[in-house]
Image (cartoon, rainbow, N blue to C red):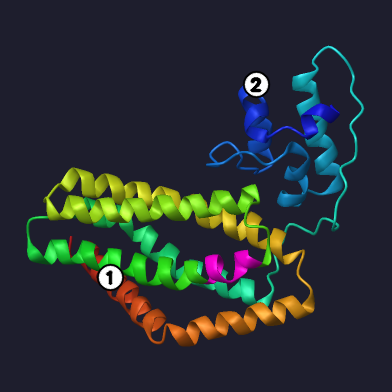
């Protein structure tokens, strides 16, 4: 079993596809992860499994790898004790989670935007442009700046989990660029496809950060580090001025318009 603890989870799943089902049952989303090179022994700490869950999962994995013999399950070394499943964030991490809430409100409206998509009229195109402006100004420049320019600098940026998150950021940016090209060509199908792909990506991405990345990072922070991060995040807030308020206004307005349209229908 020791040799597999030091293998990447992607390689293990490729060799033993059944293991993916076990990981999914413990809400470990390694299957859709873009990188998948985290070592099996690191999965437990990153996902904050309780000791009994760790033993159960490892026993199931061992049963798949070695179906014909009993295997002793080695205990993985933890830097921190597993916490209860209720997530409590430090103040700087709570800021990021709160920003996710606004992003999720926009993402939740994307299916209705797609259903009513009009790339021929000026008003229809402007709605998409406004949505893209929200993504670029708030989700990317404002929110991702805190992650990429501040938070991730506290860790080894070569870590697989951080590489996976940054890869998501780049994929999201690629979808936004593709939306603009498609909108310029009045290509309704392509605009819809990239909006939908963005929605699916961000929904999974935010869940990954809120439930896995942020709690994992929080467990390593000292009180001093928490204070430093909070101060730097406040500096970013000042740097971006009224961007958060303006972007929240866009979401509020769009929610009102969509709700009114549905009432009229």
158 relative to 144 in the view: left or right: right
Mark drawn on residue 15: 2
Q: Position of residue 178 (x, y in %)?
A: 26, 50
Alpha carbon of mark 1 to alpha carbon of mark 2: how far? Answer: 47 Å
Q: Is residue 118 visible?
A: no
From what the image shows, is residue 83 above or below residue 93? above
Q: Residue at x 68, y 27 (%)?
A: 12
165 relative to 1 in the view: left or right: left
- Confirm whether the magenta stretch covers residue 190: no
From what the image shows, is residue 66 above or below residue 97? above
Q: For the stretch drawn in magenta, what is the main secondary structure? A: helix
Describe the element under mark 2 as helix, strand or loop.
helix
> Which quadrant holds the N terminus?
top right
Q: Residues within 10 Å of mark 2 (few under 14, many from 20)?
A: few
The quarter holding residue 229 reads: bottom right
Q: Position of residue 175 (x, y in %)?
A: 33, 51
Describe the element under mark 1 as helix, strand or loop.
helix
- Confirm whether the magenta stretch covers residue 151: yes
224 relative to 181 in the view: left or right: right
Say which of marks 1 and 2 sits in front: 2
The quarter holding residue 219 reads: bottom right
Most extreme residue toward the left, as rendered? 121
Q: Position of residue 126 (x, y in %)?
A: 17, 66
Residue picked out by circle 1: 254
The part of the chain drawn in magenta is 146-153
Q: Residue at x 49, y 83 (%)?
A: 237
Q: Residue at x 56, y 84 (%)?
A: 234
From what the image shows, is residue 154 above or below residue 4? below
Q: Residues within 10 Å of mark 1 (few under 14, many from 20)?
A: some
Q: Residue at x 18, y 60 (%)?
A: 265
Residue toward you, 257 or 217: 217
Q: Position of residue 68 (x, y in %)?
A: 83, 11
């Amino acid at each position: 079993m020791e040799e597999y603890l030091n293998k990447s989870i992607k390689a293990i799943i490729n060799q033993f596809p059944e293991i993916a089902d076990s990981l999914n049952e413990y809400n470990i989303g390694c299957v859709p992860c873009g990188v998948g090179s985290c070592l099996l022994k690191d999965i437990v700490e990153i996902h904050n499994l309780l000791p009994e869950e760790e033993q159960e999962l490892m026993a199931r994995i061992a049963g798949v790898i070695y179906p014909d013999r009993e295997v002793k399950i080695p205990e993985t070394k933890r830097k921190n004790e597993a916490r209860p499943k209720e997530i409590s964030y430090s103040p700087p991490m709570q800021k990021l989670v709160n920003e996710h809430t606004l992003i999720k409100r926009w993402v939740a409206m994307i299916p209705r935007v797609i259903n009513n998509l009009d790339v021929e009229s000026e008003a229809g195109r402007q709605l998409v442009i406004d949505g893209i402006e929200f993504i670029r100004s708030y989700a990317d420049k404002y929110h991702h700046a805190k992650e990429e320019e501040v938070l991730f600098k506290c860790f080894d940026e070569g870590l697989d989990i951080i590489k996976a998150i940054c890869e998501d950021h780049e994929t999201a940016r690629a979808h936004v660029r593709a939306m603009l090209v498609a909108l310029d060509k009045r290509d309704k199908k392509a605009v819809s496809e990239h909006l939908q792909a963005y929605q699916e990506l961000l929904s999974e991405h935010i869940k990954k950060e809120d439930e896995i990345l942020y709690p994992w990072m929080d467990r390593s922070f000292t009180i001093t580090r928490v204070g430093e991060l909070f101060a730097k995040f406040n500096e970013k807030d000042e740097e971006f001025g009224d961007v958060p308020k303006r972007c929240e206004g866009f979401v509020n307005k769009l929610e009102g318009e969509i709700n009114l349209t549905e009432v009229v229908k």
